[in-house]
Amino acid sequence: MKDGTLHDIVRRPSAPRRLWLLFAQAVTVALALYFVIAVLRPEWLERPPTPVQVGAPGKSVPMLQAAPAATAGSFREAAGKAMPAVVNIFTSKASRQAHPLLKDPFFRRFFGDRLPPDEQLASLGSGVIVSGDGYILTNFHVVEGADAIEVGLADGRKAPARMVGTDPETDLAVIRIAESNLPVMVLGDPEQARVGDVVLAIGNPFGVGQTVTLGIISALGRNNLHINHFENFIQTDAAINFGNSGGALVDTNGHLLGINSAIYSQTGGSVGIGFAIPVSTAKTVLDSIIRHGQVVRGWIGIESQDITPELATSFGLARSSGAIIAGVVRGGPADRAGVQPGDILTSVGGKPVGSTSDMLNLIAQLEPGSKADLTILRKSRKSTLGVTVGRRPRQIP
């Protein structure tokens, strides 16, 4: 090895290399410093809020706008179609025993002819516009005994209504208003409804304003509830409260399935068990009231009792469905046809009878004056009797 100085053995780094080393060291120190600050003083690293630039007077302030939300799972369209045709019903009932002072001219001079508190219009229920001619379906118990009826439409209009007819046996009533450009509810088909279908209940609960609640059909064909004489209820868990009576139960297309009528409750509030009268029944009542002024039903003059397993065993019957004829009105249609107490009615007009409720509904649907076949079992022998249908006497509520 040749002799040389240290400068000759260890060469100094070149200028570009020195710059690179300085840069690497600076970055390392900066990262270390950032890490220490991020751990010990993170607030030092937060960016100050960007001020919003306010536009000149008269110009809008720039703000962020969310994109339109997806409507999957929403029932806004069904509600939007049905809500305009649901109305609020106000009624007044005059005091039957007015205070003698109300007739005194001196008293009336100071207080005028204003209605006393118990005669003021009160919001008692709801109704559904089903015809552009102003016909409205509601519950009988909503307008029962009313001396004056007023209808509040969803668009803010108010109009006096007149009673067209009532049917206490189904708790239905028809009223009419003389207004134009009325929204009309489209009728659905309750025969196609199934348990589990989504439904909306629309009405005016507690007078708070039009309200929509959501639920499903819990059961179909509910009867023996002893609410009405003729029962074939749609049961739902959609919230129905005081003031919803006469309102609409609609499907997810916004079509009318039933008229909300009653709830099962021990407190007066909704517990998820509500009942609606199928629109098929309501339409039959409406048509009959418009044609005859009252509901006309078939009648044959019999009293019946459901066949229970206990009765079937006691009487040695081979079946546990149908209706046992417990009584026959003397001289009535069934008596003239040869029906006797103890007979088991199995079909009316070719339609099977599974219970007393089935029998009442089937007979009521018969046209008075028409002929119908009754299939009966008498001492285990089947026979068919022809009966001329009579007219059911009007029931006084």
Image (cartoon, grey):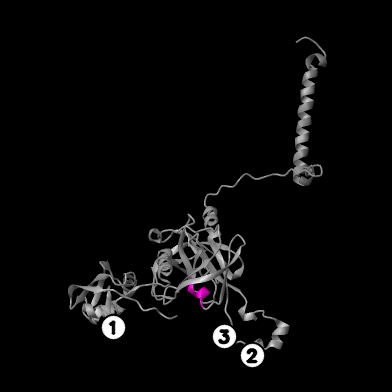
Q: Which mark is residue 100?
A: 2
> Residue 305: percent from the left, percent from the top?
30, 79
Three-letter amino acid code at the position of disc 2: Pro
The extreme bottom residue here reads: 100
* For the residues bearing labels 3 and 2, Cβ distance under 8 angstroms: no
Q: Which corner quadrant of the image does residue 322 belong to?
A: bottom left
Three-letter amino acid code at the position of disc 1: Val
Q: Residue at x 55, y 59 (%)?
A: 180
The extreme top residue here reads: 2
**Camera-nearest label, 1 or 2:** 2
Q: Secondary structure at mark 1?
A: loop
* For the residues bearing labels 1 and 2, Cβ distance under 8 angstroms: no
Inter-mark Cα distance, 3 to 2: 12 Å
The stretch of residues the image draws in magenta is: 139-144
Inspect this view and state whether residue 243 appears: no
Quadrant in the picture for the N terminus = top right
Q: Secondary structure at mark 2?
A: helix
Residue tagged by mark 3?
Answer: 96
Inter-mark Cα distance, 1 to 3: 38 Å
Is 387 or 22 nearer to us in this picture?
A: 387
Quadrant in the picture for the C terminus = bottom left
Residue tagged by mark 1?
Answer: 329
Q: Is residue 249 magenta?
A: no
Q: Is residue 110 left or right of residue 396?
A: right
* For the residues bearing labels 1 and 3, Cβ distance under 8 angstroms: no
**Camera-nearest label, 1 or 3:** 3
Q: Residue at x 44, y 76 (%)?
A: 168
